[in-house]
Image: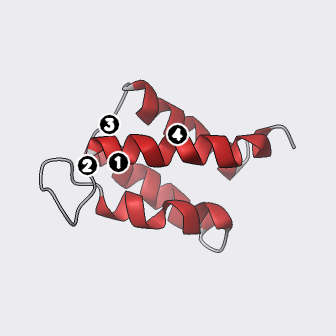
């Protein structure tokens, strides 16, 4: 599976509620930095995954904001799995 495909799977796992922990998002961030640093995927996800702190409040991102980001990511980049 491509790095983008793996990232899409991580996004789906978050959306489904299987894992919404900050640790999971931190591992997603590490993966994206390691494998997708100079790509549109990195640019798309970087702000959200670096600011996910669901219990803190602004300027950090809530769980709801992250779900929206992940859903949008899957819509925008899901076609990459088919390529």
Task: Find out whether the residues at labels 2 and 4 contact each other: C-beta distance under 8 Å.
Answer: no
Gap in angstroms between the C-alphas marked 1 and 4: 10 Å
The residue drawn where x is 40% and y is 51% is 27
Gap in angstroms between the C-alphas marked 4 and 3: 14 Å
* Residue 65: mark in rendering: 1
| 80 sits left or right of 29 in the view | right
The residue drawn where x is 45% and y is 51% is 28
Task: Find out whether the residues at labels 4 and 3 contact each other: C-beta distance under 8 Å.
Answer: no
* Residue 20: mark in rendering: 3
Image location of residue 69, percent across then percent down:
47, 49
Mark 4, residue position:
71
3 vs 2, front mark: 2
Choose top left, top right, bottom left or bottom right for residue 53.
bottom left
**10 Å neighbourhood of mark 3: few (<14), some, or many (≥20)?**
some
Q: Is residue 2 above or below residue 34?
A: above
**Is there any visible trace of residue 28 in the rendered image?**
yes
4 vs 3, front mark: 4
Give the structural element (helix, strand or loop) at label 3: loop
Give the mark, 1 or 4, whose residue is nearer the N terminus: 1
Mark 2, residue position:
62
Give the mark, 3 or 2, whose residue is nearer the N terminus: 3
Task: Find out whether the residues at labels 2 and 1 contact each other: C-beta distance under 8 Å.
Answer: yes
Q: Between 43 and 24, which is closer to the camera in this rendering?
A: 43
Q: Between 82 and 63, which is closer to the camera in this rendering?
A: 63
Give the mark, 4 or 3, whose residue is nearer the N terminus: 3
């Amino acid at each position: 599976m491509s790095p983008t495909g793996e990232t899409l799977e991580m996004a789906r796992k978050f959306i489904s509620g299987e894992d919404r922990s900050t640790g999971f998002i931190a591992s997603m961030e590490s993966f994206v930095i390691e494998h997708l640093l100079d790509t549109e995927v990195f640019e798309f996800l970087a702000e959200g995954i670096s600011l996910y702190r669901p219990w803190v409040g602004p300027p950090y991102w809530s769980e709801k904001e992250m779900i929206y980001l992940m859903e949008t990511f899957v819509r925008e980049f899901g076609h990459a799995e088919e390529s």
